[in-house]
Amino acid sequence: MVKKLLKHEFIAYKRTLLPMYAVLLGIAILTRIVYFFESDNAIFAILGFSSVLALCIACLVCFFMTYVIIVTRFYKNLFTNEGYLSFTLPVTTSQHILVKLLVGILSLIAALLSVFIAFCIATSKTKRRKRAKR
């Protein structure tokens, strides 16, 4: 029964966290595209700064929202009407809490991993062609 609890917890987290991680990676790709076409123009400087700022804000929001979703999911699943249904399952209270803790830790690790991948995408270097000396 603990396997089923884990499965349903992962499904519940996946519904809310995966779109957030996809947006984070999309902002990282956008930042990389902006810096791929980098030039000395003032518009590119403003666009580059704003994309890096958006990436930093998205990373902070990703961590904060992951934490909020973990706490909200814990509360809803144990202390509301959904909790009433959860406690009818043949699982002990400690197993409920252990499943919540395990999935919460794994979702925080997933948030950390997605932020790391986003920064790797945004800061990856491409080989530049050498300009001919004149």
Image: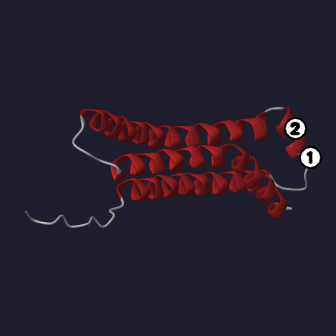
x, y percent for residue 11: 76, 52
* Quarter-of-image position of residue 51: top left
**How many C-alpha atoms fall within 10 Å of the one at disc 1: few (<14), some, or many (≥20)?**
few
- Eyeballing the image, is 114 above or below 127? above
Report whether 114 appears left or right of 55. right
Q: Residue at x 84, y 60 (%)?
A: 4
Q: Residue at x 87, y 45 (%)?
A: 87
x, y percent for residue 1: 86, 62
> Quick one: which residue is furthest to the front in this view?
134
What secondary structure is marked by label 2? Answer: helix
* Quarter-of-image position of residue 19: top right
Identify residue type, mark 1.
Answer: Thr
x, y percent for residue 112: 49, 54
Distance of mark 2 from mark 1, alpha carbons?
A: 7 Å
What secondary structure is marked by label 1? Answer: loop
Identify residue type, mark 2.
Answer: Tyr
Of residue 108 and residue 86, the one placed in the foreground of this image is 108
Q: Residue at x 76, y 58 (%)?
A: 6
Report whether 94 appears left or right of 124. right
Q: Which residue is mark 2?
A: 84
Report whether 100 appears left or right of 44. right
- Eyeballing the image, is 10 above or below 129? above
* Quarter-of-image position of residue 105: bottom right
Q: Which residue is mark 1?
A: 88
Report whether 2 appears left or right of 46. right
**How many C-alpha atoms fall within 10 Å of the one at disc 2: few (<14), some, or many (≥20)?**
few
User: Which image quarter is the C terminus in?
Assistant: bottom left
